[in-house]
Amino acid sequence: MSKKSLPKTTKGLWFYGLSGSGKTFASSLVSSLIDHSFVIDGDMVRKFVSTDLTYSVADRNKQIGRIFGIGKIAIENRMFPIMSSVSMSNDLVLKCANEKIAVIQIKRSFEQLQKVRDLYREGKNVVGVDLPLADLKTPTLENDGTCSFELMLVDYVKSVTT
């Protein structure tokens, strides 16, 4: 598939889900498909912007607010933000809808997650272990670790960006 110009309907995408679910892979793939895309990875925002935050629920909410703000700056600069985070809230889903940012949950079996992330055995304040992942009314893509996830992702992106 060749790169597409900026979509007219959807102004950005936000992937959320547990650590190791495939958000970074999804962001990279979508970035290769859409011109003027700008990846805003929650881990990178935490590393370079949110150095003052912990992994508490309150700080996770601040973090997603910052990611949203960076996404809005990207949109104002005619870029297509592709954001990702572990956490998501219903309030933020509504804000994203108002800004025409599609929010998608990426799920992966906990057994697969444990194989790719040590934090599920050792971590504290870990979403999916001792912190719940919000149960929101958003589209969900199931990552089974095969190329079917990639095909499903490409099909979904086509459906929301044309």
Image (cartoon, rainbow, N blue to C red):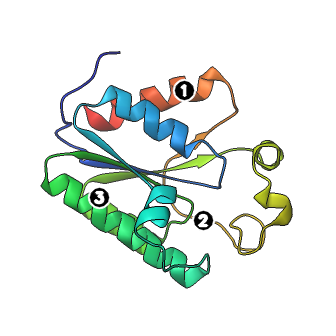
Q: Residue at x 84, y 45 (%)?
A: 111
Q: Is residue 104 visible?
A: yes
- Indicate the position of residue 69 as horizontal and vertical percent values: 29, 67
Give the left or right position of residue 12, taking residue 156 as reference.
left
Q: Earlier in the sequence, mark 1 or mark 2?
A: 2
Q: Quadrant of residue 116?
A: top right
The reply to whether dot 3 and dot 1 touch (C-beta < 8 Å) is: no
Q: Residue at x 84, y 65 (%)?
A: 122
In the picture of the structure, the residue carrying the numbered disc 2 is 135
Pair 1/2: label in front: 1
Rendered view: 67 above or below 159: below
Rendered view: 23 above or below 150: below
Does dot 1 land on a helix, a strand or a loop? helix
Q: What number is the disc on residue 71?
A: 3
Does dot 2 land on a helix, a strand or a loop? loop
In the picture of the structure, the residue carrying the numbered disc 1 is 150
> How packed is label 3: few (under 14 Cα within 10 Å), some, or many (20 or more)?
many
- Indicate the position of residue 118 as horizontal and vertical percent values: 80, 54
- Indicate the position of residue 160 as horizontal and vertical percent values: 33, 38
Which residue lies most toward the bottom here? 58
The Cα atoms of the two marked residues, 3 and 2, are separated by 23 Å
